[in-house]
Image (tube, helix red, strand yellow):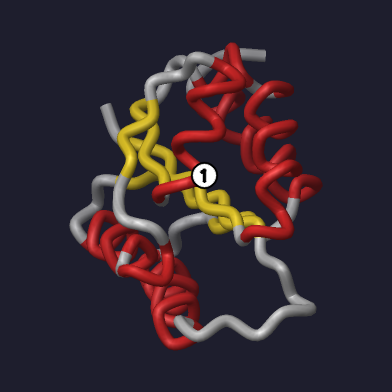
Amino acid sequence: MKSLALIAHDGKKDEMVQFAVRFQRALANWNLVGTGTTARLVIAKTGLNVTGLKSGPLGGDVQIANLVLSGQVDAVFFFVEQMDVHPHDPDIHTLQRICNITDTPIATNPATGALVMRGLELANGHS
């Protein structure tokens, strides 16, 4: 089974937790990986099994990009805070670029995330 990746900037972590609660039943059918704090928050609120990687600024975004490149991730949910400057912007852009190159869905907000989840559910025979 492949994985879904969960990432959220600090200003979007609450939205990611709400998203994980909303789609908890569907997410439970996937291997989940997430960057540091995002993974811990989702686990604490939902009890989902999320493999925690490094935090984004410490290389977590790059770890997920590597998983995407190796074909181990079906979709990335990366809720981005557009109004802040991030010191690891090159890593963020690398992950987005890798998703585009590999044709891997990347949802950068909850509305797009919901559409991707619905598409994954349909593709896997769940409605």
Q: Is residue 59 left or right of residue 48?
A: left
Considering only vertical position in the picture, is 65 above or below 36?
Answer: below
Residue 79 on image: x %, y %: 65, 56
Considering only vertical position in the picture, is 101 above or below 66?
Answer: below
Considering only vertical position in the picture, is 72 above or below 68?
Answer: above
Q: Quadrant of the C terminus?
A: top right
Which residue lies at the image location 66% right of the left edge and 65% below the top edge? Answer: 80
User: Quadrant of the rendered structure where residue 69 is?
Assistant: bottom left
Task: Give the amino acid type for the residue marked by disc 1 in the picture.
Answer: Thr
Q: Is residue 62 left or right of residue 103?
A: left
Residue 72 on image: x %, y %: 25, 46
Depth check, front residue: 114 or 57:
57
Considering only vertical position in the picture, is 87 above or below 20?
Answer: below
Depth check, front residue: 80 or 25:
80
Which residue lies at the image location 31% right of the left edge and 34% below the top edge? Answer: 51
Q: Quadrant of the N terminus?
A: top left
User: Quadrant of the rendered structure where residue 24 is?
Assistant: top right
The residue at which mark 1 appears reads as: 38
Residue 22 on image: x %, y %: 73, 23
